[in-house]
Amino acid sequence: MILFLAGTSDARELALTIKEAGYPLLATVVTENAALELRKNGLNVHTGRLNQDEIENFIEQHGVTMVVDASHPFAEEASKNAMAGAKEKGVLYLRYERDRQEYEHEHLLAADTYEEAAEKAGQIGGVIMLTTGSKTLQIFTEKLLNQSDVTLIARMLPRKDNMEKCEQLGFPQKSIVAIQGPFTKDFNKALFQQFEVDVMVTKESGKQGAVDEKVEAALEMGIQVVMIKRPKIAYENQYANFEEILQHISREWKGVLT
C-alpha cells in the first residue's frame, strides 16, 4: 500500500496515475471538498491533517510500504511529519513537488517569510490583495488591517471555516473575495481592476498552482507583486514529474499489484 499525501490539483492527477498503474493507494487530504474530488475517481481517501504519530499508525495499520508526499509546496509541517514517520517505520519516502517558476521584474519583490511579505506590502501601501489563503491571514491582519494607508483584500476559498476565521480576526466582509480557482489571466486582471489593487501578495507555488496567471496579470497592469519564497526543506528522493515517481515506485515496490 502507498500512503499518498495530496495537496494540489496536480497531486490529484499523480494519485490517479499511480492508481491506474495498478498500485494500491490510500490518499490523505485536509478538506472534505478535496476528498470528494478524489473519491469521484475511485480513490480511497482519509480526510484531516496527520501528525507524525498518526502517519506511523497509518503505516502500521494499512501495511504501507512507501509514502508519496505530494502535499502543497508550503505545507511544511505535513512534509516533515511524512518524512519523519516514514523514516521511523523504515519505509520509502518519495517527494513530488512542482517545478519552480522564475520571475525577474522591477515590480516584483521576494520575501522569505509571511511576516516579511506583510512588511514589504505595508511599506508600499494602498490596496493590497492577499492570495495566500486563510492559514496565515492573521499575520497580515495584525500588521496591515489597521494601517491607515492600507486597504486589505483577501481572496480565499469559499469555505465556512474561512469565513469564520475572517470574522474572528475582524476582517471586513466587503473585503473578502470568496472564490475557487484556477483563474485565467483575464479574470485576474478584471478582479484587480475591480478592487483597484496596488499590491498583490502571493506564494511561489509553481505553474500548476496558477501563480503565473495572476503574477503576469498583475505585472502587466503595473501592480506591485510580493512573492513569498518556498520553504527550504531537504527532501529525500525529490521529483518534479510523474514518470520519475512511477519509475522509482516500480524499482522499490514491495507488495502485490491490484
Image (spheres, rainbow, N blue to C red):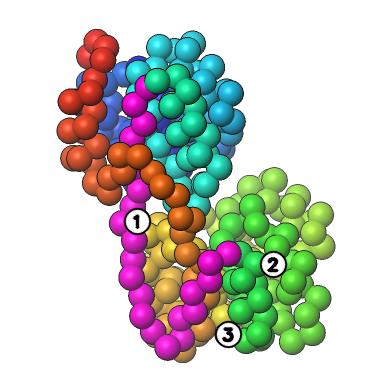
Q: Earlier in the sequence, mark 3 or mark 2?
A: 2
Q: Is residue 137 above or below residue 250?
A: below
* Residue 144: percent from left, percent from top: 73, 74
Q: Is residue 175 left or right of residue 101?
A: right
Q: Name the residue carrying label 3.
A: 198
Q: State the residue position of label 1.
A: 208
Q: Name which of mark 3 and mark 1 comes first in the sequence.
A: 3
Question: Quick one: 173 or 200, which is closer to the camera?
Answer: 200
Residue type for callout 3: Asp
Mark 2 is surrounded, within 10 Å at the Cα level, by few (under 14), some (14 to 19) or many (20 or more) other residues, namely some
Residue 239 in the image: state x and y as whole percent.
28, 45
CA separation, marks 1 and 2? 25 Å
Q: Depth check: give the residue in front, 22 or 112.
A: 112
> At which x and y percent is residue 126?
66, 86
Looking at the image, residue 14 lies above or below residue 178 = above
> Are dots 1 and 2 in contact, CB under 8 Å?
no
Label 2 belongs to which residue? 140
Q: Badge 1: few (under 14), some or many (20 or more) residues near its Cα, within 10 Å?
A: some
Q: Would you identify the image quadrant in which residue 140 lies?
A: bottom right
Observer-side mark, 1 or 2, equals: 2
- Secondary element under disc 1, as helix, strand or loop, is helix
Magenta segment includes 77: no
Residue kind at label 1, given as amino acid type: Gln
Q: Is residue 238 above or below residue 194?
A: above
Q: Does residue 170 appear left or right of residue 75 in this picture?
A: right
| Residue at the image position 58 percent from the left and 23 percent from the top | 53
Looking at the rendering, the stretch of residues picked out in magenta corresponds to 91-113
6 or 193, which lies in front? 6
Q: Is residue 42 visible?
A: no
Spatial separation of the CA atoms under disc 3 and disc 1: 25 Å
The residue tagged with tag 3: helix, strand or loop? loop
Q: Is residue 47 left or right of residue 44?
A: right
